Amino acid sequence: MPKLPNDTRTLLGVQKTILFGNPNVGKSVIFGRLTNQYVAVSNYPGTTVTITRGWMNQASGPVLLLDSPGINNLLPNSEDEVVTRNILLSTHEADIVQVIDAKNLKRGLFLTIQLSELGRSGVVVLNMWDEAQLAGYTVDTARLQQIFGVSFLPAVAIHNSGLSDLRTKREYPSFHYEIQYPGLIEEALKELAPYFQGLGKSPRGLGLMALSGDSTYFQFLHGKLPAAILEKIQAICKKTAVAMNTDLRQIIDNTRMAEAQKITNLVLRQSYPKKEKRIWSSLEEISLHPIGGFLLLGVVLYFLYLFVGIFGAGTMVGWIEESLFENHLHPLLIKTCDFLLPFPHEHEHNEGILTKDSKVTATLLWWQKIFRFLHDFLIGEYGLFTMALTYGLAIIFPVVLTFFLAFGLLEDLGYLSRLSVLLNQIFRLMGLNGKAVLPMILGLGCDTMATVTTRILDTRKERIIVTFLLALAVPCSAQLAVIMFLLEAGGLGWKGIMIWSGIVVAIIFIAGFLASLIIKGEENPLILEIPPFRLPLLRNIFLKTLARVEWYLKEVIPIFIIGTAILFLLKELEFLSVIEKLLHPLVVTWLGLPQESASAFLMGFFRRDYGAAGFIKMAQEGIITKQQILVGLTTITLFVPCVANLLVMVKERGWKMGINMFVIVMIIAFLIGGILHRVLQWFPIAL
Ligand SMILES: Nc1nc2c(ncn2[C@@H]2O[C@H](COP(=O)(O)OP(=O)(O)OP(=O)(O)O)[C@@H](O)[C@H]2O)c(=O)[nH]1
Ligand SMILES: [Mg+2]
């Protein structure tokens, strides 16, 4: 297989196929099946937000397959949809494999009509055929093939069934289906056609996009057409809109939708659904019920706590940290380092050596210094093994692993979209709709990735608010791990958990509410496709967890190591005490914490879970009270999550906005920490 270059444009002449379709229809499962390359698959819309590329082996040679974010209309609403529309228009020679959820035919055909209007070639996969059959649907695929001129292949991608044609087929026919629009639109299309010659396969389809008045489309055309031509196109669109005295997009969309409905009526039949669906159906109903839904949420959270909090943070950390690291690995490492890097410890003395030849003595002392430095770097107070790897692998890793497993299960079950609908009302108070809940919940896995997922949100206002709230108060898996561990090991009990989570939730709502007042922009009603509950596939959960574990080991552990090395050097160069003194007013006077916690805050700048882990040692040494742990944890929870998150914030929202958010988040974190310290002083609560 040729190696993929970073830029697809350099792959001129390579045969390309785009996997295209509505959100959550199984595109990424098919991508995985055809390329043997794993990409994230989950049971909620918006799993894929950027283009993924992979090679597919075909008889004619390798074909480049592109997996695209789900899209509901080629007139995009959100940033991820813009990505799909743009890739589709920029690679007009590429074949299209449109994936449709067979249970939701009309929604898919709405896109098939648009592919026809663009004159594209390809094939349609009627995926989720298993669920369609359970629901009692039958689809006349021969009739569909007749109508659109392309094959419609029933498939069950998760079982690798119905995909063999995609592996062997080489030449795809063009989609052909033409709709008649009202007279003035047809006239405008004729007038527009010459300007779009050579830009794609069908000037008609491109003209319809222009008439729909989508601003992102005009941005796309910028640079592809001379400014004068663009102006002429815009003038024709404006003239037509004025003449028809209406929103052209609505007319075009409605005409297409009516046509999709007409075809659906022709080809789709439904008999009685099969019985197996019943248990799921009642669970589906409960999950959206205003009271039942919250009770179910309580049950889900309780099981999450049992699995992650008790089993992960208690039992598994016990095995790994106590039994393996403390009893076996640490003594072995200390012995090895003492043997390989000998130097006199403080209570020993050098007299014997010092009396000998002064040159030999100087060399010896120099070596001893290097040995001591290396010894401390590896197993000292801020040692690579004793701190970075012990925190990263023995304490955080087991909790993160259990969390990833549980989270993957909830994702694949289809629970997260339902939670979004349930929380929609509450989120509306802060100017967000339920779709925004999704990135916030994904933030519990990883805030950085969730910040990228804000692309699925429809308005700029929503994207800004969610990015900000993720940075401020949504604890990621690694941080939850430390918090779970500290609540367990620091003995903060249920009161500690309630206060910490109460503050975090309250801050999310207050900050979200205030941000929605300050940030200008529109609010959108919730339009979210709710997937059915599905029995999760163990293989997918396993692969997904493996991918996340790989990310954790490759991205998080190195930051722990670098952070520890920096702390170690600061200590060696005696800067740490200077920094502790500088931070004294903030850490000791304002937050009421011991001076040593300054280093925890320093660590928190690299990653906030690492900062929180800084309290573990103090808790184990008994130099910090439970109230102080609570203040420290709460302050650090409200920090910007990690360096990677800050970089993504800047990338997604721009420099100015990213830095502003960082500063505001820091101010809020310390403000709330200080207030909590005072409240706990005035109203001492026995934790
Ligand atoms: N029952 C059933 N489930 C399927 C089938 N194909 C995919 N799924 C499930 O559908 C869900 C969505 O699959 P994805 O491949 O992530 O969908 P996608 O189209 O890539 O979604 P986005 O990236 O969000 O647009 C997952 O839970 C899959 O396990 C199928 O043929 N039958
Ligand atoms: Mg996908």
Image (tube, rainbow, N blue to C red):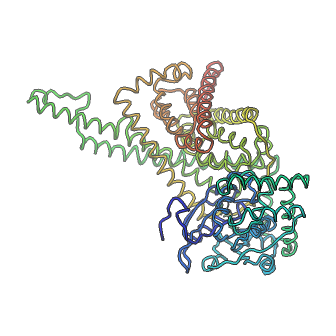
Nearest the viewer among 439 and 279 is 439
**Location of the C terminus (image quadrant):** top right
Total labels: the figure holds: 0
Residue 118 visible in rendering: yes
Q: Residue furthest front?
A: 228
Relative horizontal placement of residue 336, taking residue 26 as reference (left or right):
left
Nearest the viewer among 53 and 198 is 198
Q: Position of residue 172 (x, y in %)?
A: 67, 77
The vertical placement of 618 against 308, above or below, is: above
Nearest the viewer among 593 and 583 is 583
| Residue at 65% over, 32% down | 499
Nearest the viewer among 361 and 276 is 361
Residue 36 visible in rendering: no
Q: Position of residue 666 (x, y in %)?
A: 58, 30
Identify the image quadrant of residue 581.
top left
| Residue at 52% over, 48% down | 315
The vertical placement of 13 against 292, above or below, is: below
Identify the image quadrant of residue 389.
top left
Q: Position of residue 226 (x, y in %)?
A: 67, 55
Q: Position of residue 568 (x, y in %)?
A: 38, 34
Relative horizontal placement of residue 183, taking residue 33 as reference (left or right):
right
Identify the image quadrant of residue 29.
bottom right
